[in-house]
């Protein structure tokens, strides 16, 4: 998600409520409490990471 960190907690809570399987907050988006709440529900959670940097680093490719 590309959101302001101040909105991250609400977005994470909405993702949980909608039954998302994972939440990814982009580089610079940080909310430790939202991270903890989301992980407690069993969802995968990535915070403060750039997909553009992580995909090549992990040897993954974009899915069309």
Image: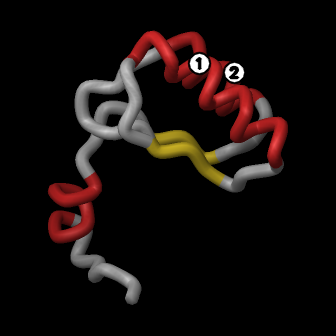
Q: Earlier in the sequence, mark 2 or mark 1?
A: 1
Left or right, 50 with reference to 22: left
Residue 22, position in %: x, y? Answer: 61, 50
Q: Residue at x 25, y 67 (%)?
A: 55
In what element is the residue under mark 2? helix
Residue 3, position in %: x, y? Answer: 40, 30
Left or right, 50 with reference to 18: left
CB contact under 8 Å: marks 2 and 1: yes
Residue 16, image quadrant: top right
Label 2: few (<14), some or many (≥20) within 10 Å? some
Q: Residue at x 56, y 44 (%)?
A: 23
Left or right, 16 with reference to 26: right
Quarter of the C terminus within the rendering: bottom left
Q: Residue at x 28, y 56 (%)?
A: 51
Q: Is residue 47 above or below residue 9?
A: below
Q: Residue at x 40, y 17 (%)?
A: 5
Residue 27, image quadrant: top left
Q: Which residue is mark 2?
A: 37
Residue 14, position in %: x, y? Answer: 73, 33
* Badge number at residue 9: 1
Quarter of the N terminus within the rendering: top left
Residue 39, position in %: x, y? Answer: 66, 32
């Amino acid at each position: 998600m590309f959101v302001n960190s101040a909105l991250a907690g609400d977005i994470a809570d909405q993702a949980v409520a909608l039954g998302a399987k994972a939440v990814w907050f982009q580089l610079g988006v940080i909310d430790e409490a939202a991270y903890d709440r989301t992980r407690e529900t069993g969802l995968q959670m990535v915070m403060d990471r750039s997909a553009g940097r992580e995909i090549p680093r992990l040897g993954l490719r974009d899915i069309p």
